[in-house]
Amino acid sequence: MDYSQEYKQKLVSADEAVKLIRSGDWVDFGWCVNTVDALDKALAKRTDELKDVNLRGGILLKPLAVFDREDAGEHFTWNSWHMSGVERKLINRGCAYYAPIRYSELPRYYRDSETPDAVAMFQVAPMDSHGYFNFGPSASHLGAMCETAKDIIVEVNENMPRCLGGTECGIHISDVTYIVEGDNPPVGEMGAGGAATDVDKAVAKLIVEEIPNGACLQLGIGGMPNAVGSLIAESDLKDLGVHTEMYVDAFVDIARAGKINGSRKNIDRFRQTYAFGAGTKKMYDYMDENPELMSTPVDYTNDIRSIAALDNFISINNAVDVDLFGQINSESAGTRHISGAGGQLDFVLGAYLSRGGKSFICCSSTFRTKDGQLKSRILPTLNPGSIVTDTRANVHYLVTEYGKVNLKGLSTWQKTEAIISVAHPDFRDELIAEAEKMHIWRRSNK
């Protein structure tokens, strides 16, 4: 069937499309690399006409035009499912707020939500011959989002990779209200940070030696997971699989080194399965039209049952800090918000349920403040306002540059001893003293 006529009928300018939005509306702005560009600029022009418009999205890779004005917060509010550095700056302006949720729950949240029907708009790859616009590297929750939206506006970007997969990785033209052809900006990039530090490499070495041939990998974003990926690419490991929330550049390096084939995966054999991707152009080029990759909704990738079904599942994620009770904070620095819950807890739980599976939470033992003070990431108790991402009952392995410890099932004094053993030596006596005050230290330990 030829959909060209319907395409022409629904094709409008960005300025025309955003006329659908009224004061008080909820507007989904996309997700990560799918966040709108031309439509964002068009909506910004209507600032004076609008009040109390709630925008919703996450992991912004560049500032939004709607928040350029100093008084933007009087007109628009940003509600984020997971925050980037761009969004953290909006918090300080009183324009942005985090919406706490396990990432895996997003599709159901949209389908069950009592929030008034929203306008959904997001970037897509060009329409194919069957009338479908592909979501690019963000199947995530966009299918569910579209099911409940009162109007859907797609912004076509010729640079968006077309990512293949299972279900809910695109939308048909018949379900679209308007089509906007934008300026085809480059797909937003997210680097892995600077070069791996000696600490990153030390942590990576401790983790990689725990990975068997045929393992299935999940990597978070950041220096340490990236260092693990680099070390895996240089290793003798083989027959690895991928089942991850976020697809990152490290997977491309591992795959090109011939380490990934998915042959031992219990489900989705030979496919690299992911919910969304953010990285460099190298990664987007690799993802484009690649039948080895499988773009699926996050309620599949992050479902504990999916993860547990994969033998030798290895989950690797970062932490901001950890306390002597084994509570992991990966979301904030006290009350200062950093990111979000994401899928970390899902993978911590699912990896442990996997036959032969292991979950690793990693961090440097210390960090330096802006004025140069050395501070421990291992604390007696989490700082006031810090968020518990993984409870003390859930953590499996904790890794710093000083070692790795299996915390599962340990009593409080055993757990305290293990955690202090991977703390920076300069802070261990202080941590022991605090542990004694909290009655979670046995004198025979030291």
Image: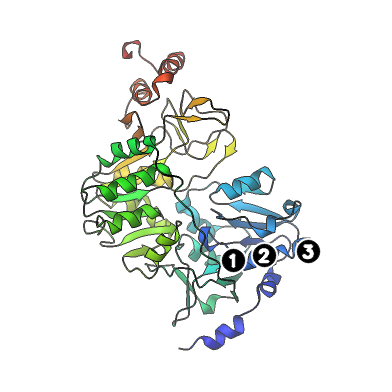
Circle 2 residues within 10 Å: few <14, some 14–19, many ≥20: some
Could you tell which of marks 1 and 3 lies nearer the N-terminus?
Answer: 3
Image quadrant assignment for residue 334: top right
Contact between marks 3 and 2 (CB within 8 A): the answer is no
In the image, 142 versus 403, the foreground residue is: 403
Q: Which residue is mark 1?
A: 120
Circle 1 residues within 10 Å: few <14, some 14–19, many ≥20: many
In 3D space, how far apart are the residues under numbered discs 1 and 3 (Cα atoms)?
20 Å
Image quadrant assignment for residue 184: bottom right
In the image, 223 versus 84, the foreground residue is: 223
In 3D space, how far apart are the residues under numbered discs 3 and 2 (Cα atoms)?
15 Å
Q: How many marks?
A: 3
Q: Which residue is mark 3?
A: 49
Contact between marks 1 and 3 (CB within 8 A): the answer is no
Question: Callout 1: helix, strand or loop?
Answer: strand
Q: Which residue is mark 2?
A: 41
The residue located at (34%, 64%) in the rendering is: 293
Please, what is the three-letter code of the amino acid marked with disc 1? Answer: Ala
In 3D space, how far apart are the residues under numbered discs 2 and 1 (Cα atoms)?
16 Å
Question: Callout 3: helix, strand or loop?
Answer: helix
The residue located at (34%, 36%) in the rendering is: 203
Could you tell which of marks 3 and 2 lies nearer the N-terminus?
Answer: 2
Contact between marks 2 and 1 (CB within 8 A): the answer is no
Q: Is residue 166 left or right of residue 181?
A: left
Could you tell which of marks 2 and 1 lies nearer the N-terminus?
Answer: 2
Please, what is the three-letter code of the amino acid marked with disc 2? Answer: Lys
Asked if residue 406 can be seen in this view, the reply is no
